[in-house]
Amino acid sequence: MLNSFKLSLQYILPKLWLTRLAGWGASKRAGWLTKLVIDLFVKYYKVDMTEAQKPDTASYRTFNDFFVRPLRDDVRPLNTDPNILVMPADGVISQLGRIEEDKILQAKGHNYSLEALLAGNYLMADKFRNGTFVTTYLSPRDYHRVHMPCNGILREMIYVPGDLFSVNHLTAQNVPNLFARNERVICLFDTEFGPMAQILVGATIVGSIETVWAGTITPPREGIIKRWTWPEGEHEGSVALLKGQEMGRFKLGSTVINLFAPGK
């Protein structure tokens, strides 16, 4: 009964306006009120502030500053073996496996379309058919910067407008085509493992998606697909990122989906 009520709210509530309101509030400097909100958030979600470079909540001017807080260098040692991929985010792997032609597993008994996830870009989708995928869910308590699983050179970035459903376990099991419906930013890289897509999926209350090379991608939310491309190889103006290097961030949390080519 409670789950049915929560799902109904996903369709009834004005998610875009709630997200805009949350983004506005999270960017405001409100002194003691900001600290109070952060302290309550830390207590409710059991956030481990000992991992942060600034463990004192009073050091954050806004809630957004707290939410994208950097971690101490020693708390996430990087595996330097070039044959091993690292996690793109501080989250939980909710699904992983093989892409069956055009189908990606969303939850038990629920698939969604690879091509739809990639905004109908069949040429990009062809790179990943019968490849592998990993879906990483970031809960509110997690560190919300996104990093590179391996060295990569950026080839293409696509902003896809969409819904702002929550992306938790409940919605993954009950909202059809969840990740292909929500707002997202698709980043295509050339890597030593072949082409790799790293997709930052928005959700309710996710006030902003950013990348290190372009800054804030959303907002504004203009309702149109936007595409940027870069030539092959390293050259002046190229975006080359190292394994473990930050590539983007969420202001409030969501999901990262990685796609890899078959045989890689």
Image (cartoon, helix red, strand yellow):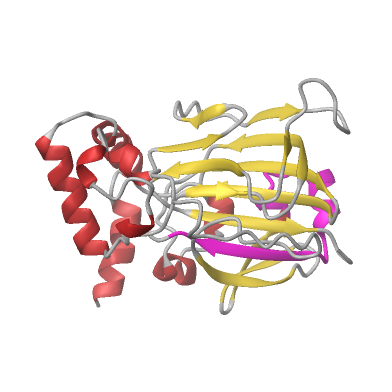
Placement of 7 over or under 218, stated as above or below:
below
Q: Give the residue displayed 43% in from the left and 70% down from the top.
A: 169
**Most foreground residue, 205 or 9:** 205
* Percent of width and height locating residue 42: 24, 57
* Percent of width and height locating residue 221: 46, 29
Q: Give the residue displayed 77% in from the left and 59% down from the top.
A: 260
**Most foreground residue, 50 or 259:** 50
Residue 17: say if magenta: no
Give the farthest residue toward the top. Answer: 236
Placement of 22 over or under 77, stated as above or below:
above
How many badges with numbers are in the image?
A: 0
- The part of the image, by quadrant, that contains residue 78 is bottom right
* Percent of width and height locating residue 47: 30, 61
Side (left or right) of 45 relative to 155 = left
Quadrant that contains the N terminus: bottom left
The stretch of residues the image draws in magenta is 115-138
Q: Give the residue displayed 30% in from the left and 37% down from the top.
A: 17
Residue 134: say if magenta: yes
**Most foreground residue, 35 or 122:** 35
* Percent of width and height locating residue 43: 20, 61
Q: Give the residue displayed 35% in from the left and 39% down from the top.
A: 16
Placement of 97 over or under 153, stated as above or below:
below
